[in-house]
Image: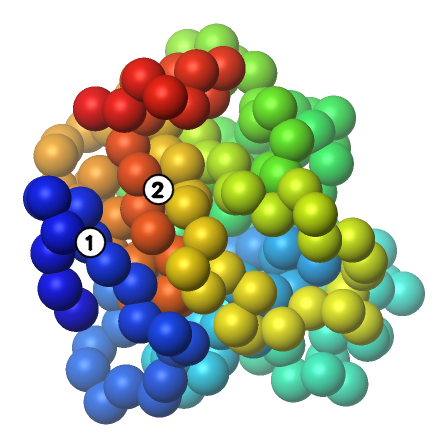
Amino acid sequence: MTLDGGRLLPMASPAASESQPIFERIGIVGIRLLGGSIALAVRQRWPACLVIGVDDKSFLEVAQRMYAVDVSADDLEMLSGAQLIILAGSKQDNCRVLKLLDEYVDETALITDITASSGIDTTLAEGISHRFSYISGNLSVDEVNGGLVQARADLFSGREWFLTPKRVNSNEVVDKMSKFVSELGAIPTIVSSLSDKNEKV
C-alpha cells in the first residue's frame, strides 16, 4: 500500500491475507450488487472474517450458493455481534434499518451505508445511539448496473469510495474504515459532504 499526496492508493484487487481482519465480524444488510461485492471481496481478502448477510430469503439463497456470506437471515437480530454494519440496500431501506439498529445491535459497532447515488440522509445519524459511530459512504459506480449475480470481488478496484464521518467516537474509527476500503481495492476519500464531492477534507 502506498501514499500519494496523503491519500491511500488501492491494490489492484483484494488478495487473501494472513493478517488479522480489520473487522472480525461484518454485517451486510442488502446483499445485491454492492453488498454482494463487498461480501465477496471480504471473503477473498480475509477468509477468517465472519460475513453476516441480512436480506430477503430469495437473495440470501443466491448469496449462499455464491459463497458470499458465512451466515444469513432475514432478521436484524443476526447483527447483534457485528463490529461493522454496512447498509447496502436502497436509500429508503437504509434509512429504515438505521433507525432500528439500536434495538438489535449489542456491540459498539461502526455503521456505514453504501450507495451509488446521492447517499443516505446523513442527518439521521443524530438519532442513533451514541454508542455507535456512523460514517456515510458513496461509491463512484454509477455506470455499473446489475444485481447480486453480477457481484464481484474486484468491483471497487481503483474507484473512489467517498466517506463522510457524520458522528464518530474517535479518529481511529475513520482510520479503520479508510483502511478497510483501501484493502478492498478502492480509494478512500474523506469529504465533508456527499453533496459536494469536490469538498475533500
| Residue at 69% across, 68% down | 151
Q: Tell me the amino acid under the disc marked 1.
A: Leu
Q: Which residue is mark 2?
A: 110
* Quarter holding residue 135: top left
Which sits earlier in the primary sequence, circle 2 or circle 1?
1
Q: Quadrant of the C terminus?
A: top left
Give me the disc on residue 167. Answer: none
Is 36 situated left or right of 103 in this image?
A: right
In front here: 183 or 187?
Answer: 187
- The answer to whether residue 141 is above or below residue 120 is below
| Residue at 41% across, 46% down | 160
Task: Provide the secondary structure element on which disc 1 rests.
Answer: strand
Task: Provide the secondary structure element on which disc 2 rests.
Answer: strand
Camera-nearest label, 2 or 1? 1
| Residue at 43% across, 16% down | 196
Horizontal and vertical percent for residue 152? Answer: 63, 73
Q: Is residue 94 visible?
A: yes
Tell me if mark 1 has few (under 14), some (14-19) or many (20+) residues whose alpha carbon lies within 10 angstroms of its own.
Answer: some
Q: Quadrant of the N terminus?
A: bottom left
Give me the disc on residue 8. Answer: 1
Horizontal and vertical percent for residue 24? Answer: 33, 68
Disc 2 from disc 1: Cα separation? 21 Å
In front here: 18 or 13?
Answer: 13
Q: Tell me the amino acid under the disc marked 2.
A: Leu
Is 184 situated left or right of 89 in this image?
A: left
**How many numbered tags mark residues here?**
2
